[in-house]
Image: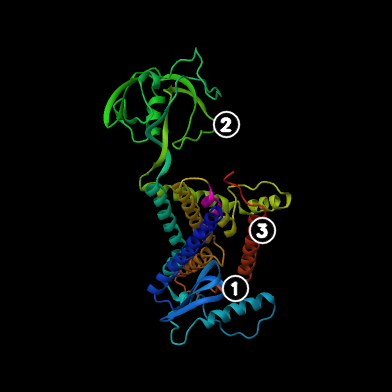
Amino acid sequence: MEILLYVGGILFMLIGLGLSIGLHEVGHLVPAKLFGVRVGQYMIGFGPRLWSKRIGETEYGFKLLPVGGFISMSGMYPASSGTGPAKGVFRALIQDARSANDETIAEGAEDRVFYRLPVWKRVIVMLGGPLMNLILAVVIFTVMLSGIGLQQGTTTIASVSECVVPSGSTQTECGPDDPATPAAEAGIMPGDVLVSIDGTPVSTFSEATAIVQAAPGKTLDLVVERDGAQQTLRITPVAADRTLTDASGQPLLDDQGAPVVKKVGYVGMGAQMGFVPQPLTAGVEMTGDTVARVGSLIVTLPVRLWDVGVALVTGGERDPNGPLSVVGVGRLAGEVAATEAPVLNRMFGLLGLLGSLNVALFVFNLIPLLPLDGGHIVVALWEGIKRAWAKLFRRPPPAPVDATKLVPLTVIVATLLIAMGALLIVADLFRPVDILG
């Protein structure tokens, strides 16, 4: 059964990755067609073709390796001027790129080419793919947080401590001199549902905790629901040193990584954990936080890759927040699916991985280097700047930017991306990241 769940997690992530890539390319395809550009192909994957079908002027299909996708737009760059055979490796690469570009320009459709579009339309076409991944991430995180909910303490009481013990104590039984907890003295019982404290309605245990912690020595009216009826109890929190926790019950840590201990109001009751739906804005906030984290990873990517290589060679532990390949993400998905946890917990983890993957696709594709989408956006913006400059000084409009001249740099970037992917795949196979312990 565990193996089936593991395989199911991998399949979930592969299907999710395929949909993410497919929607990314739809983000390019739709505006390109709306702006009149001739699109010859829409393909998911690379390598040998598995299946395809032509609909109108566009061939739609799947290829063997589901690690990316592309659409083939007519005339990404200006047509070549036919200057004869190229000499030198780089010039040969440029000439090959120009020849391939010329082949996309169909006879009679010379005006339906990408490079003739206004700059703003080209930016929209190239930005459409990454934006689709960003929108998909928002949808996934919203389903996670507002549909399933965030696991945290609910208003249902799970336990009541009999006595007050020092923070961090390993004591399991109450001694004769240990004072009773305010919760026990007030008559709070497991199964009670908190309704309000000191006249303030509470919907989560963290809200109740905040009121209690801020009121040491103050007597509070506590309304609970028990057996379908509401009862009002009186409770006086005692001042005690306690480790502060977040909404999910995890200890808060200081700058040195040590638990934060503070003298606060304490009553000695614990909550049942459950999934509490969050506001719809929580998905957007989580997406923004994830974009910031992935952006930080991209900025420090060379250092992170070096650390991955060192861990692979020396057998050291990998950074759980470091880069992963598709193999690594699939492996984590399998582990999450096979872990001994409730179904909702596993689904929450799988959706989190898929949402983070889409954020990574969004941020990574905006890197301003060809062949990535960000590189094409920079080329379009550069042409826009040149045209604005010429218009400002009343000069003739400049010729369209010939990005084929950047092919040597593009080849170098592509080679580095392939090398990075190979390193991460090997590391994910032989030195995988351990985030589940």
Figure quadrant of the C terminus: top right
> Under tag 2, what secondary structure?
loop
Q: Which mark is residue 426?
A: 3
User: Could you say which disc has been placed on residue 405 in the image?
Assistant: 1
**Element type at mark 1:** helix
Q: Residue furthest top?
A: 177
**Measuring 55% from the left and 52% from the top, which residue is drawn there?**
2
Give whichever of 365, 137 is nearer the camera.
Answer: 137
Counting residues from the N terminus, which is met first, the one under dot 3 or under dot 1? Answer: 1
Q: Residues within 10 Å of mark 2 (few under 14, many from 20)?
A: few
Residue drawn at 44 percent across, 48 percent down: 344
Near mark 1 (Cα within 10 A), the count class, few <14, some 14-19 or many ≥20, is some
Instruction: Measure the C-alpha gap from mark 1 to mark 2.
Output: 54 Å
Residue 258 marker? 2
Q: Give the x, y percent position of residue 393.
A: 46, 68
Q: Give the range drawn in magenta.
A: 334-339
The answer to whether 434 appears left or right of 118 in the picture is right
